[in-house]
Amino acid sequence: MEAAPTLETVVQAVQTLYHSPDLSAKEKASKWLGDLQRSVHAWQMADQLMRLSQNVESSYFAAQTMRTKIQYAFHELPADSHASLRDSLIAHIEQLSAEASPVILTQLCLALADLALQMVMWKNSVQDLLQRFGNDPKYLSFLLEVLTVIPEEINSRTLRLGANRREEIIQEFSQSVSMVITLLTNCIDTTNDSRLLTKVFKCLASWFNVGVIPDDLISQSKVMKAPFHVLLNRETPSGLHEAATDCICAALYVAEDLSKHYPLAELLSQGVMMLQEPYHMSVAEEDIDKSINFCRIFTELAESFLEIMVKMPGKGLGQLAILDFLLTCVGHHQYEVAEITFNFWYRISETLYKQDNQEHSDLFRPYIQRLITALCFHCQMDPDHEGIPDEKDDFGDFRIRVSELIKDVVFLVGSSTCFKQMFEALAAQGPNTSWETTEAALFVMSAVAKNVLPNESEVVPHVIKAIINLPNDAHIAVRYTSTHLIGELGEWIEQHTEYLDPTLGFLMKGLQTSELGSAAAHAIQCICDVLSDHMTNHFEGLLQITQAIDSFNLSHDAAIGLIKGAVVILAKQPFEKVTEGVKQLVTAQTHPLSQLVKTDGPRDGLNSDPAIWLDRLSAIFRYANPSISNGQLHPCQPALMEIWPILSQIMGKYQTDERIIERCCRCLRFAIRSVGKGAVALLEPLVTQMVVIYQVHQHSCFLYLGSILVDEYGREQGCVPGLLDMLQALSVPTFQLLQKENGFRDHPDTIDDLYRLAARFLQRCPVSFLQSQVVVPILQCALAATSLEHRDANASVMKFFRDLIYSSTGHEDRDDYEVRKSAVQSAINEHGQQLINNLIVAVVFHLPVYMVPEIGDVIYEMMVFDRPSVCRWLEAALKSLPTETKPGSISATHKQLIDFHKKVTSAEDQNQVSYALRDFARLFR
């Protein structure tokens, strides 16, 4: 947008966006207004619209535009205009505060907050605002709003304040906090308005979150007692109740550091202990929202005091009464309340496991037993539920989380003890136990079944006998969960093989029941995985099942699992039987594929989807790994040679369908991995077809498959030229794809697979790769990809750089050592400065913290290779950084730059480099 539009044009566009019945006109207006917001003219237009105050829509657009411009484009303004912008914003707020829509006021408050944080010359902005508006009740709502959002915005990633500026702001906050507390206290003393009190508690929570409220100040003020008084009042409105809860939770989070905030922790502990009765009242009144709020507070208290609770259980702030509070919440009739406590139970179990103190663990065991009993109750389905448990609805998700939680905490009780606990609870209820109670207990048993001691003989035999003798009229959900439990007991059955045959009979019966088929198939797979040595006599039966697999009502994953189980058993057969068994399994999948190749009509139904058969073939080749002696023909080789023509035809027919092509590549990947050198005859025709299709359809899975081929055949001298030709042919369309607008961002999988392929060349045939013509464009592309914010793709690029350096340092005894070292030295000399520049820029401006370690690894390996050069390159890279990102705001001081350079260049391992990079990046964020 070159010329500034008129104010009338902007108003008309806003009206069109909100009120036009013409969808195309609304879309056109939306795009035009978006372009306006990104242009430099937006500053003036937003200011003029706010002065005009023609209607709510235009005022909101103006306020939102002002906020986004300050947030994302503050650098567009010269420093001498900052003060006038501040004054203009404050004037707008003074004009609108009485009658403005809350959403407009919020946007203006956010704009003013972001301005205050970025405007270095505006010193003590909080004190200024308090002095200007603190004595006028008309502006109290605005003042509370802006005092809430200023601390919230301090950690905004989009503002990129930097550690130095953030520290400066925190210091200003520390000087202003007493004035803020005084304002909040006056509000509490002078009003009963729930909306105003809600703002007070939100503001207090915000200031707790930045950690600047001193304990002595808060303990002497009424302000911390107010949220507890609100929660003790049964008549408190829900919005105020939630705000008070948030405030207390924020304070509890700060109090977790007991070494600094012990007085605050004591104050909060006393207040929380008074909330048990109000919680019970919320339960009695069926006010679920308030029950959730109380549970959040109890859980936050428990998490804050977790460390002292484990170190000094039952003493001082380590009192265990809070666990009774939590278990009371877990006992709430709504499982959503119980779920709030889950993270605490995870954390305390992990802490106790690491502490490894049996005496302390014994103290917590009764609480864990009560927890498991309560969770079992929550897992009960409704008595009128029909069919099997639905694992995809909210309740199903909850049961999955319960299962994971029990697996984490059960070590404190013992899996066998927990299993027995559930069994005895059922036995105590006698023969009239409801089906939903039985099913829930079986569900909990299945969560711990894998870890039941193999020598357990008191309970498990009774459970298995009861399951295999379930009557046909037993509720289908009980039979379903029992089937799952049987599969989880595989390791126990391995030590008690007398139960194998009756168990398989039970599972075969389930396999033929439509609702139980998938569960039975999964259980059979589990049995095959664990008892493969004991299942060899059952292979013929398994083979017949797999050949008739589509006659059962199985999910796709269950069918794959059943085939996997059969193949695992097949691999244990005498060698001469494996080839025939693989052939039979493969033929059952290739026959429908060959029919699909001949069919030109549209695909109707699942059976006409080649992905089904390709996935099954992948499972066969993936798990058919018998022991092979030297010189023996791999049993999968004949099958692979037979199916290659069909796979080739499938790739040709469905070359536009990325999903099918990925399945083909996956199948070939496992087949080639399995057969190895025995599949070398496929190399030329496979590569030829890959290249032909890739010229038209850039499916990244071909690059991945190429890396498999290089991994398998890259050390075969006769194969290397063809593999390099493949790389050259695949690289050309790849670079063309990535050179398009947003090419890197839109195709991270291509980057990931391309550099996995390049890394394989460095690992298997480095000299040939380093001397090829394609290495230069691959290096240049990798340099451009250093800032790509995609974890897998960026990690592959960084691994490529590491492997490039490794290829020059390893295997010094080989004849090609000097050639490799010289080639890498030449590449590093030419591109080293740019690489260091790009890596520093990526860390400082583009990549999230969790991606920094890979960058650190590359820099460290470069230093191992040539530390003096890296010292020079790093110094040049640091000098090129903008140390003043905003007028008057120093991102990194000269001393900080020197310290960082010293930390990196003197590092003795990768971690030291990564830590230095992480801390340095904070100076610019």
Image (spheres, grey):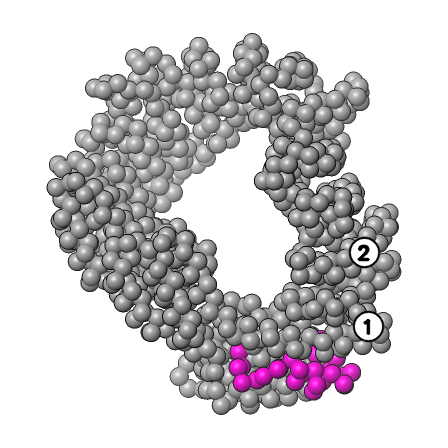
Q: Residue at x 22, y 59 (%)?
A: 828
Q: Residue at x 58, y 75 (%)?
A: 169
**Magenta residues, start to end:** 118-144
Whether residue 130 is in magenta: the answer is yes
Checking the image for residue 188, the label placed there is 1
Q: What percent of the width, then of the height, locates residue 904? A: 36, 61
Q: Would residue 815 be seen by someone viewing this image from the given angle?
A: yes
Q: Foreground residue, 82 or 659?
A: 82
Q: What percent of the width, then of the height, locates residue 364? A: 71, 37
Checking the image for residue 792, the label placed there is none
108 over 342 or under it: above or below = below
Mark 1 or mark 2, earlier in chain: 1
For label 1, count other residues whose C-alpha is less than 10 Å away and answer few (under 14), some (14-19) or many (20+): some
Q: Foreground residue, 462 or 603?
A: 462
Checking the image for residue 270, the label placed there is 2
For label 2, count other residues whose C-alpha is less than 10 Å away and answer few (under 14), some (14-19) or many (20+): few
Q: Given the image, on which type of amino acid does mark 1 rest?
A: Ile
Whether residue 402 is in magenta: the answer is no
Question: To which quarter of the image does residue 511 belong?
Answer: top right
Give SS at disc 2: helix
Which label lies toward us, 1 or 2? 2
Q: Given the image, on which type of amino acid does mark 2 rest?
A: Gln
The total number of labels drawn is: 2
